[in-house]
């Protein structure tokens, strides 16, 4: 099966160049063609793309130069029309590849009913950027386990997914065509989610191939989020009534629980029994012990607090602040906000302190009508796990 790698690019030539070099280095012997869609670039992309692509991939390289920037959806659709492969791999130009990245994707796509596959995406620092898209109990979007250590086993387990990121997405050409391609009403946002939900609504399964590893340097294109409000409105009009919260289902695969923080932000946490087991010997742990345990269990709230306290006792204020900032990625809770705000001020990071104060000062009452509405809907549909999440928040945040 020939794979067509379709890479949309707009300026940022050095980023595209690094992507192509790593793709060529780690794809030797693969049945693959490469189509780069130059979305009206005005930098070195215009002159340098064709010679480098032909040098790296020969006759299996196509450069499609569009007269102006037509956006992600139109660019990718144009690339798909120019491609010849039985399967299409849409990949951002800010991706770099690693050895053996393609065989796990091929294998996952061959599974019954699987019609879209994505690799595990890591940030350059080695933490997780994407192992699946999740819909929270408040219907907000997030990347499952973003910020986890890249070698954590949860990142490679099979989770029930409604969507994957379009930053690196493989699917059969026929499935892409039957779904209508990327919806061109969006402009650089939500196109991938719309496509995945279209596939999912047709009964297709989506799978993350956790043994396929790519590094994502994330959203470097200028203006990437300029149309978020309009894109979100279009997405809601097309799919708002059909989306089902699934973060709690995905988290349960790994023995985690989902809760709502006081301001309504969703977070994943340990169940009480696992928390107690970790807390049993926390008082005797060194900073090194805490770091090791947090690599094994990134959702141990007490571990971050213990690590920050140990650093602060040693006069290592910056390291203490960093520990609490890592914790704040996972836990929107006063237990983190209070020491984080204090240390941010102590380190002279006034913008961080102001941001923390703003989040901590958000009135829970603003979320109460929304959560009550979702609670009533979950009860009507007899969705017991969701009902319990809403009820817990309503009890902890009385009117």
Image: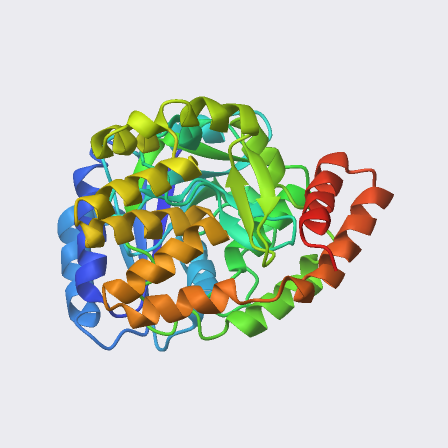
Q: Nearer the viewer, residue 32 or 269?
A: 269
Relative side of 152 to 28, left or right: right
**Residue drawn at the location 46% of the way across and 28% of the way down:** 108
Where does the image place residue 243, in percent across and percent down from the top left? 68, 50
Q: How many marks?
A: 0
User: Quick check: 25 above or below 338?
Assistant: above
Q: Give the image location of residue 84, x and y in percent.
A: 40, 47
Q: Is residue 216 visible?
A: no
User: In the depicted view, which residue is nearer to us: 168 or 152?
Assistant: 152
Residue 132 locus on image (x, y percent): 48, 42
Q: x and y percent of residue 397 in the render?
A: 68, 54
In the image, residue 274 above or below residue 183: above
Q: Residue at x 33, y 38 (%)?
A: 306
Q: Is residue 119 above or below residue 177?
A: above
- Determine which quarter of the picture holds residue 50: bottom left
Screen quadrant of the C terminus: bottom right
The residue at 77%/38% (across/down) is: 383
Residue shown at the point (42%, 57%) measured from the top left = 338
Q: Quadrant of residue 342?
A: bottom left
In this picture, residue 13 sits left or right of residue 240: left
Dividing the picture into quadrants, the one containing residue 66 is bottom left
Asked if one can make out residue 395 in the rendered structure from this viewpoint, the answer is yes
* Image quadrant where one finds the N terminus: top left
Q: Is residue 26 left or right of residue 328?
A: left
């Amino acid at each position: 099966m020939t794979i067509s790698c379709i890479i949309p690019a707009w300026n940022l030539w050095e980023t595209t160049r690094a992507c192509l070099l790593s793709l060529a280095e780690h794809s030797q012997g693969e049945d693959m063609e490469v189509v780069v869609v130059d979305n009206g670039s005005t930098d070195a992309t215009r002159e340098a793309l064709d010679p480098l692509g032909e040098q790296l991939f020969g006759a299996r390289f196509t450069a499609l130069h569009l007269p102006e920037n037509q956006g992600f959806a139109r660019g990718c659709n144009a690339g798909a029309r120019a491609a010849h492969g039985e399967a299409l791999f849409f990949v951002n130009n800010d991706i770099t590849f690693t050895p053996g990245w393609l065989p796990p994707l091929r294998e996952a796509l061959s599974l019954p009913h699987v019609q879209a596959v994505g690799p595990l995406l890591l940030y350059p620092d080695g933490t997780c950027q994407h192992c699946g898209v999740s819909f929270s109990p408040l219907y907000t979007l997030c990347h499952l386990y973003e910020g986890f250590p890249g070698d954590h086993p949860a990142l490679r387990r099979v989770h029930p997914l409604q969507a994957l990121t379009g930053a690196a997405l493989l699917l059969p050409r026929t499935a892409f065509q039957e779904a209508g391609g990327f919806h061109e009403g969006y402009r650089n946002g939500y196109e991938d989610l719309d496509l995945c939900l279209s596939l999912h609504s047709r009964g297709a399964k989506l799978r993350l191939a956790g043994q396929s590893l790519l590094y994502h340097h994330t959203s470097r294109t200028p203006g990437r989020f300029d149309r978020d409000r309009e894109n979100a409105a279009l997405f809601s009009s097309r799919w708002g009534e059909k989306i089902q919260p699934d973060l709690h289902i995905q988290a349960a695969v790994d023995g985690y629980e989902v809760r709502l923080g006081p301001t309504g932000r969703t977070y994943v946490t340990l169940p009480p029994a696992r928390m107690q087991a970790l807390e049993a010997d926390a008082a005797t742990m060194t900073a090194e012990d805490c770091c090791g345990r947090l690599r094994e269990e990134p959702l141990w709230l007490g571990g971050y607090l213990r690590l920050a306290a140990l650093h602060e006792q040693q006069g290592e204020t910056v390291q203490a602040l960093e520990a609490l900032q890592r914790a704040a990625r996972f836990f929107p809770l006063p237990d983190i906000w209070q020491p984080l705000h204090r240390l941010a001020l102590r380190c002279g990071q006034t913008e961080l302190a102001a941001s923390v104060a703003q989040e901590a000062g958000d009135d829970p009452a603003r979320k109460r009508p929304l959560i009550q509405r979702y609670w009533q809907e979950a009860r009507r549909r007899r969705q017991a796990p969701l009902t319990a999440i809403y009820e817990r928040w309503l009890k902890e945040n009385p009117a």
